[in-house]
Image (cartoon, rainbow, N blue to C red):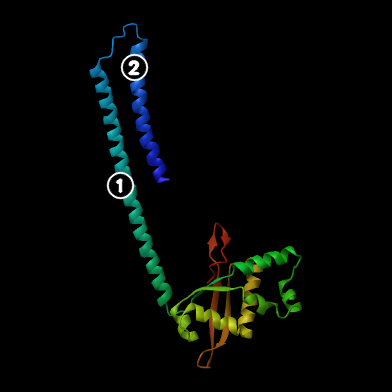
Amino acid sequence: MKRLFIQRLHGLFFYVSVVALTTELGAQESSPFRVPIQADSWVSWIGWVFVVMALGGLLVFWINLRLQGQITMQTRALRVSETRMRNLFENTPVAIIEEDFSAIAAWLHELRKQGVADLKAHFGEHPGLASEKFLLVRVVAANRTVLRLSGVENVQEYEGLIRGAPTTAMLDTFVAQMQAIWSGEPEMTRELRYRGIDSRAGHSLMHWSAPHEEGRPDYSRVQ
């Protein structure tokens, strides 16, 4: 858009110059007091045309520098903000996981279109359905606290760990998350009980939420 604006501005200066020259020549030709145009008049007009075009070019160059400076400042500020948020995400002592539930949301939408009215009853009629649909959830990111507590090195290992052997507690939580999506609730809080890598039992409070984009929950970036 910036390039198009500059091209149009440059073209406008050229158009004004040509119109001014054409108008002057036409006025002299239609006037009863027309006098022959001397060669030096042509040279003078051509010189003014180039002056106007040069001034227009300088103005376009100045506008381009201002826009480029603003874009550079905004880009730098955005990178600083992204770095700050990434450091906060990675170094917080609270376990944070970002997951993609968009495939689940799409499946629930199709399920409703098929006439299913009670999701809880539907899962009761299909006991293995939760384990099957659990594989549709994709782990987008996990901070260092999650990786340390899980005893893995990276997000790929963590995703493989939970996909390989989902516990009953994990599946129950997953069903509750799907119920929240089904009910149009963008967030939920639930107490979790788990067993750590050292086999010790533990419990935590999970807050699950989907950010809003254009007034609607974005289930591709659930935390």
Give the mark nearest the N terminus, 1 or 2: 2
Depth check: give the residue in front, 140 or 45. 45
Residue drawn at point x = 41 percent, y = 42 percent: 4
**Based on the displayed image, in which of its 4 quarters is residue 33 positioned?**
top left
* Element on which disc 1 rests: helix
Residue drawn at point x = 34 percent, y = 60 percent: 76
Question: Can see residue 183?
Answer: no
The residue indicated by pointer 1 is: 65
**Based on the displayed image, in which of its 4 quarters is residue 172 positioned?**
bottom right
**Based on the displayed image, in which of its 4 quarters is residue 41 positioned?**
top left
- Residue 69 located left or right of residue 208: left
* Element on which disc 2 rests: helix
Q: Which quarter of the figure is the N terminus placed in?
A: top left
- Residue 187 located left or right of residue 84: right
Position of residue 69 measured from the top left corner of the image (x, y, whole percent): 31, 51
The residue indicated by pointer 2 is: 25
Q: Residue furthest top?
A: 32
Position of residue 223 measured from the top left corner of the image (x, y, whole percent): 52, 72
Q: What residue type is labelled 2?
A: Leu
Residue drawn at point x = 29 percent, y = 27 percent: 49
Q: Which amino acid does label 1 sit on?
A: Leu
